Image (cartoon, rainbow, N blue to C red):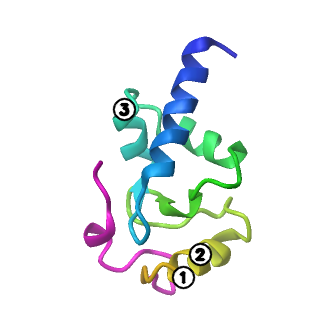
Amino acid sequence: MSNNHNAFRQKVYQLVNRIPYGRVMTYGDIAMYCGRPLAARMVGVIAHFGPVDLPWHRVVNRFGGLASGYYGGRVGHRAALIQENIKVDDSFIIVNFSSVRWTP
């Protein structure tokens, strides 16, 4: 793995760790703030294989949709968000997404 990829991955870890309780960011938001605006999919791969102690449940798609690859699938993702008082509808989309979307 290249040093550039390792550096990007570390930036992703650091940013995800900063997402506040009750707030979310998108894969694309994270990619952009970590200096690679076209790397949203890479952020998803990093999330899938990243440290389990990071708040990955606070990362969603650009529409506020939940990840089927999350531990426990979208049902597990929704349960984790609901514990933080984030409302998720029956289609696994965050209700009032713009109000819980976080900008560092």
- In percent of width and height, residue 95 lies at 36, 80
- Please identify the dominant SS of the magenta region: loop
As drawn, 26 above or below 15: below
Q: Is residue 72 magenta?
A: no
Instruction: Please name the residue shown 37% across and 27% down the image.
Output: 35
Give the residue number, with chain letter if any, for mark 3. 37
Report the span colored magenta: 88-104
- Based on the picture, tell me whether residue 97 belongs to the magenta stretch: yes
2 or 83: nearer the eye? Answer: 83
Q: Which amino acid type corresponds to the residue marked 1 in the rendered image? A: Gln
Q: Quadrant of residue 36?
A: top left
Quadrant housing residue 15: top left
Identify the mark nearer the N-term, 1 or 3: 3
The residue drawn where x is 55% and y is 41% is 13
Q: CA distance from mark 1 to mark 3?
A: 30 Å
Which sits earlier in the primary sequence, circle 2 or circle 3?
A: 3
**Mark sitting on residue 80:** 2
Q: Is residue 28 left or right of residue 82?
A: left
Q: Which residue is mark 1?
A: 83
Which amino acid does the dot numbered 3 rest on?
Answer: Pro
